[in-house]
Amino acid sequence: MNPGLCCCGIIPAMPVPPIATPLPASLPPVIFLMGPTASGKTALAVHLAERFPLEIISVDSALVYRDMDIGTAKPDAETLAQAPHHLLDIRDPADAYSAAAFRRDALALMQDIVARGQVPLLVGGTMLYFRALLQGLDDLPQADPALRTAIEHEADALGWPALHARLAQVDAETAARLAPNDAQRIGRALEVYRLSGQPMSALLTLRGSEPALAYRLLQLALIPTDRAQLHQRIAARFDAMLEAGLLDEVRRLRARYTLTPDLPAMRAVGYRQAWAHLDGETDAVAFREQAIAATRQLAKRQLTWLRSWPDVIRLDCLAEDYAAQAESCVRAHLQIIPVQTIPAAPS
């Protein structure tokens, strides 16, 4: 075999760094399926779950919220009947859900899935959650409420884009991955820097080379070779969301829950712009344009993460045979597991 190819014949995104301790084949397998928004992750995950003993865990910071279905492109009832997803609808929109909470929940689910004789398939585009799962978050300083309040006062006076620019001066790597109005993550990154004197990105790279997960990992990423086609998909999907009643969904959320526009759920792409539109800040044309532009920026940030993500196999989500390529990778990953370690799922 060509040493530059993986077992399924796809070129990894970058050379795989040496692992301090080789992962034994006896470790249970786990699969990550990552990619930008509108790249087809859910459809591929369901396709794979129908063909292999997989259980899907959602890795999406918006899908955790109840009653946020249209704007998150949440799988519909028919899809969930085919392939149930974990970590959907587990929080009210008024509640917060952190990367640390995701890591705790996902690790517990992975253990349960393996105990059932299945293989965890983690699917989504919230790259911070994937990194938290792989590396943990314990190395970062604890939150400081007084400092956070001071940062929020700065934002009130200057605006979050100005604080994003300040973050870029001290931690360009983290700033490049965040939107200029991502108040929660910009505030946290500035808080970490001011508490520790070091950029968050530097602290996260100080962790050792030992894998944080006691699993044998396959990482797949859907990367479009033509960015323009991804942009077309994004626009078409948002138009479909509008047709399906996105604005009515946001109206119902505002009526049912005690919400403010600065809550994490309402800062999600699409919902933030819908909130502003319902408040009369934009007309219908500007609302649509701003939401599509914000979604494109989200995709760009996700691709920025994936460009530097180690040990990932890239699949062109625009290729006609990308699902077959993914099948080959998964089949090769599961083949080396002794048959007795994957008992049949209970009937």
Image (tube, helix red, strand yellow):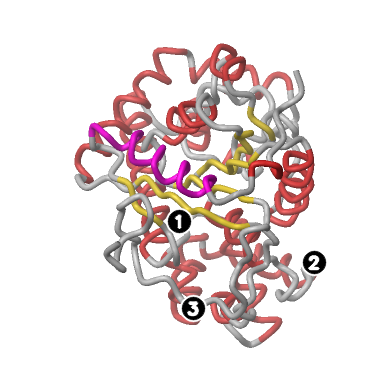
Q: Quadrant of the N terminus?
A: bottom left
Q: Main secondary structure of the magenta part?
A: helix
Front in this rendered view, residue 26 or 146: 26
Badge 2: residue crowd in 10 Å (few <14, some 14–19, many ≥20): few
| Residue 137 located left or right of residue 282 | right
**Amino acid beneath label 3:** Pro
Badge 1: residue crowd in 10 Å (few <14, some 14–19, many ≥20): some
Q: Secondary structure at mark 2?
A: helix
| Residue 319 located left or right of residue 245 | left
Q: Secondary structure at mark 3?
A: loop
How many numbered marks are there?
3
Residue 89 drawn at (x, y percent): 70, 28
Q: Which mark is residue 145?
A: 2
Q: CA distance from mark 3 to mark 1?
A: 33 Å
Residue 318 drawn at (x, y percent): 25, 37
Tell me if label 3 and label 1 are in contact, CB under 8 Å: no
Rendered residue at 64%/17% (across/down): 252
Rendered residue at 61%/38% (across/down): 58
Start and end of the magenta stretch?
A: 320-335
Badge 3: residue crowd in 10 Å (few <14, some 14–19, many ≥20): few
**Residue situated furthest bottom in the rendering:** 197
Compared to residue 100, the image places residue 96 above or below, namely: above
Q: Quadrant of residue 199?
A: bottom right
Label whose residue precedes the other's in the sequence (2 or 3)? 3
Q: Which residue is mark 1?
A: 179
Q: CA distance from mark 2 to mark 3?
A: 40 Å
Rendered residue at 41%/37% (across/down): 327
Q: Which mark is residue 18?
A: 3
Compared to residue 79, the image places residue 301 above or below, namely: below
Front in this rendered view, residue 227 or 272: 227
Q: Nearer the viewer, mark 1 or mark 2?
A: 1
